[in-house]
Image (tube, rainbow, N blue to C red):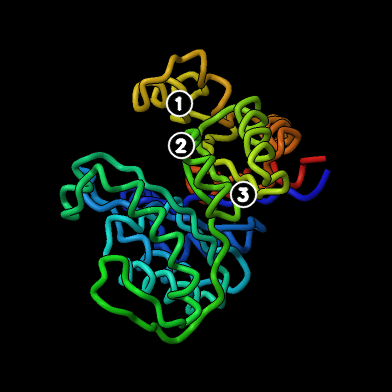
Amino acid sequence: MGTFEIGVILPGIAVQRRDGLTLGQAAEHAEEAGLDGIWHGDHLAVGGPTLDAPIALAVAAAATSRIRIGVSVFVPAIRPLVWAAKQVATLQYVSGERLVLGVGSGGGAAQWAAAGVPYGERGRRTDTALELLPRLLAGERTPLPNGSGEVELAPAVAMPPVWVGNASAAAIRRAARLGDGWFPSLITPAEVAAGRAELAGQGRPEHVIAIGGTAALGGGPGLPSRSEIAAGISGAYGRPLEDVLEIPLTGHPKEAAERLTAYREAGARHAVIGIAGGDWRAQVDLLAEARGLMP
């Protein structure tokens, strides 16, 4: 059946303060628990406190030595291309080439306006970034897309794996054409299987598939239920509740292991999990237990 890796989204500012946890401590705990990756989102102006993804992940990389360092997901198109390449290259360098680059073109229109980038250009700019990043990171002299000259970055680093985010048809096509993997979030095993078939139809039958999920494992007061988490997903993304009810991982780690096994059987090989409630350290330990219970 093959191996299955589990990573975790690093805690946000509110959770860090609540649990008395720094980013470095969180990253170190996930590595010691035996998880396979630590991930951070990439947001600019979302109306709440967020950290800059490359800086946050540099902190996480400095506190660890083995675990994957991942962006879930990096949005290169809201940055000048060469600046985006420099951030990716730096993260790859300081992490000892442990970076996995999730890439997307999402976020609300307000984020793009804050970056000074027209919302309608996001797809084209994302494709251009994915086309040119390998040359830029390799230290090759690379023509700039606006015709303003050429640039050569140093030090050269290995190109990290690129997992293209989102479950849309456009994202699957972009993953097949320009990525090493497909990285949809909050979808069912049946949707994973359908996406896998679509990738195979585009000549990428062995493409890496990673899924983004959410979890609140165990029990106890104050822990959200599966239906409560699903209701939040439904409201945030405008999806019918019945379509998302099976997505949250809840209950005993054995139940989570069974759900993750269904994703593996559908074709996924990685899961990147955001913690939906409960003490962050304890939830990481329960995720690691679930990973160990998978057949």
Whether the residues at callouts 2 and 1 have beta carbons within 8 Å, the answer is yes
Where does label 1 land, which residue?
Answer: 229
Q: Is residue 47 left or right of residue 243?
A: left
129, above or below 259, in the image? below
The image shows residue 102 at horizontal and vertical percentages of 49, 54
Q: Count the labels in the image.
A: 3
Q: CA distance from mark 3 to mark 2?
A: 14 Å
Q: Is residue 115 left or right of residue 162?
A: left
Q: Quadrant of the C terminus?
A: top right
The type of residue carrying mark 1 is Ile
Q: Is residue 262 left or right of residue 234?
A: right
Where does label 2 land, which residue?
Answer: 276
Label 2: how many residues lie within 10 Å, few (<14), some (14-19) or many (20+)?
many
**Picture residue at 58% right of the left edge, 22% below the top:** 246
Judging from the image, what secondary structure is the residue with disc 3 in? helix
The image shows residue 52 at horizontal and vertical percentages of 31, 61
**Picture residue at 35% right of the left edge, 46% below the top:** 123
